[in-house]
Structure formats: C-alpha cells, structure tokens
C-alpha cells in the first residue's frame, strides 16, 4: 500500500509539473493609446515639415518656390524628410533630415 501511494504521488507530481510547462499567458493587455487619428497624423506631418523648413532656412538660407519637402514616418516615430529642388527635368537634392516630432530635434545628413 505504501508503494502504491508513493507511485501515485510521483505520477501526480509529474502531471502537475508537465501541465504547468508551456502555459500561454492569457492575461489581457490593452494596446497602447499611441495610435494617432488621421487628423492627428496630418497635423503631426505638417508640424514636422515646418520644423524642417525652419531648419533649412536657418542652415541653407532662403528657399525658393520650387523647393519641396517630402516626409515619411519611420517605425521609431521620427520622420525622414527629403528636401529637394524641382528643376523640371530632374530634382536637385538639398538635404535628408531626420526630425523627431516630440523633441523637435533635427539630424542632418541621414539617408
């Protein structure tokens, strides 16, 4: 009888240990509310382009009407801004900037 209890205790322990392994965490984790609405994205992109324009004006001098600023949001939340001049047949690159909309910091020369 004693051997039977010991064997059952071992089997029960093994079942408990094995059933606990590989358990999937099913706790609810809400998504962060950092997702911007469409309007907020437009406002943020305009702000980034204005920061880039201020930087280009300060660093490279006055800009002309044929100068363009294209912003692309990166995975880390910053924007890569391509500044170029449209000369008709081709575009003349002026700068590649990395703009952080939160800190308003600009890094020149990224690409």
Image (cartoon, rainbow, N blue to C red):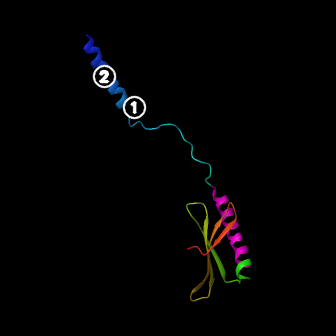
Left or right of 6? Residue 81 is right
Which numbered disc, 2 or 1, marks the residue closer to the eye?
2
- Residue 3 position in % (x across, y down): 25, 14
At horizontal 67% and vertical 58% (from top left) the residue drawn is 40
At horizontal 26% and vertical 14% (from top left) the residue drawn is 4
Q: Earlier in the sequence, mark 2 or mark 1?
A: 2
Residue 29 on the magenta segment: no
- Residue 69 position in % (x across, y down): 64, 75
Q: Is residue 3 above or below residue 90?
A: above
Q: Quadrant of the C terminus?
A: bottom right
Q: Is residue 69 above or below residue 35?
A: below
Residue range in magenta is 36-57
Q: Are marks 2 and 1 in contact (CB under 8 Å)?
A: no
Q: What kind of element bears circle 1? A: helix
User: What residue is shown with label 1?
Assistant: 20
Query: Quarter-wise, where is residue 29 in the image?
Result: top right
At horizontal 66% and vertical 65% (from top left) the residue drawn is 45
Secondary structure of the magenta portion, mostly?
helix
User: What residue is shown with label 2?
Assistant: 10
Q: What kind of element bears circle 2? A: helix
- Residue 21 position in % (x across, y down): 38, 35
């Amino acid at each position: 009888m004693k051997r039977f209890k010991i064997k059952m205790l071992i089997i029960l322990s093994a079942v408990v240990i094995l059933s606990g392994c590989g358990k999937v965490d099913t706790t609810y984790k809400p998504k962060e509310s950092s997702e911007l609405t469409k309007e907020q994205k437009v406002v943020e992109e305009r702000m980034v382009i204005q920061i880039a324009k201020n930087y280009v004006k300060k660093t490279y001098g006055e800009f002309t009407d044929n100068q363009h600023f294209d912003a692309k949001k990166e995975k880390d939340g910053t924007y890569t801004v391509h500044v170029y001049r449209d000369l008709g047949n081709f575009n003349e690159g002026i700068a590649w900037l990395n703009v952080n909309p939160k800190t308003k910091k600009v890094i020149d020369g990224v690409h």
